[in-house]
Image: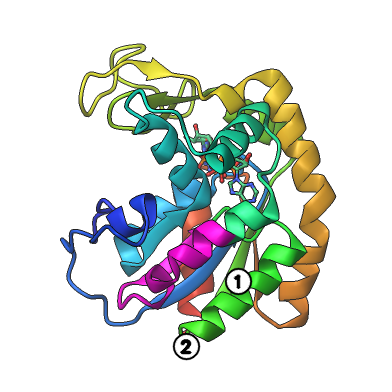
Amino acid sequence: MYSLGKRLAWLEGPGATCEKTNPVPPRAWHLVLLGPPGVGKGTQAEKIVAEFGACHLSTGDVFRHAARNLNGKAPSPAMAIALAAMKRGELVSDNTVVELVRERASCLACQYGFLLDGFPRTIDQAHALDDILRGVGSKLDAAVNFFAPEALIIERLSGRRVCKQCRTGYHVANKPSRVPGRCDACGGELIQRDDDKPEAIRTRLQAYAATCNPVLEYYRKKGLLREIEASGDPDAVFAQTRSAIQKLA
Ligand code: AP5
């Protein structure tokens, strides 16, 4: 059983060093997690990390980490534009996201392996990822695509709550905290992400629909795509995910 760890090099960029709290896993998995917002990529990522030891590298987490750590300072112009797009539920520009991942290329060559969550989202990002991986002598084992009906996705996003302090995730119906509005882990206040409000959810789903097919087709043609039906509860979905990963061995 591996822990999530702090992933400092990923969250803060190349100047930071990760705290290596986990033993090095027997195999470094190199996986991309695909699927619409709210389908449960982050939830499955936690379970994959616990079982297979790869680092969970979410591009959304990098932006949220940057927003939380401004400490009263103004963000850089590129980050300000990215955070405003994110709040509206729009995609951040390919250039900004690719640059952010390129700066962190050493994370993609790490001996723990990686689970890229939220990248690539467009075909240009998929090509850029290949280029970045080539540069560090790494390659993908699979692109795991989670899918579920849109009504279920909207229900999952609308009910999601996160702890303002430690970022633990909850759902008002599927994964409620013991004390309503308070985090089980640290007692912090549970809040709704700005992009989980109805208008932003609509925009995010539209952005996904407009960009997903070429990416799925790209990985299908390479023989890397694995499809997971994600309507069941998290453990049922993970049983499929685990089996898909084990079959790659
Ligand atoms: P990002 O952070 O990547 O968000 P997302 O892809 O929209 O995905 P989410 O984190 O919202 O959902 P998830 O699939 O991880 O679901 P979760 O497990 O939390 O991106 C945010 C923004 O950053 C983007 O909109 C964009 O602006 C920007 N960005 C990031 N990367 C970018 C890129 N590459 N290019 C351009 N822009 C980029 O689950 C959701 C809820 O459902 C939770 O409450 C959970 O408890 C519940 N749940 C999950 N699974 C189940 C289950 N099986 N049964 C019941 N409930 C479940």
Where is residue 127, by image quadrant? bottom right
Kind of residue indicated by mark 1: Leu
- Please give the residue where the numbered disc 1 appears in the rendered image: 129
| Label 1: element kind | helix
Pinpoint residue 88: horizontal percent, then vertical percent.
Answer: 67, 27
Tell me, what colour scheme is on the image? rainbow
Element carrying mark 2:
loop
Q: Front-most of 40 and 75?
A: 75
Q: Residue at x 31, y 67 (%)?
A: 53
Give the magenta-colored segment's residue range: 99-116
Q: Residue 150 location in percent, x, y?
A: 75, 37
Q: Quadrant of ligand 1?
A: top right
- Report the disc number at residue 156: none
**Alpha carbon of mark 1 to alpha carbon of mark 2: how far?**
12 Å
Q: Position of residue 194 (x, y in %)?
A: 56, 22
Q: Amino acid at mark 2?
A: Gly
The correct choice, above or below, for 56 with respect to 209 in the image is below
The answer to whether residue 241 is visible is no
Kindly tell me whether mark 2's CB lies below 8 Å from ligand 1: no
* Residue occupying the point 47% across, 20% down: 172
Query: Mark 1 or mark 2: which comes first in sequence?
Result: 1
**Quadrant showing the N terminus:** bottom left
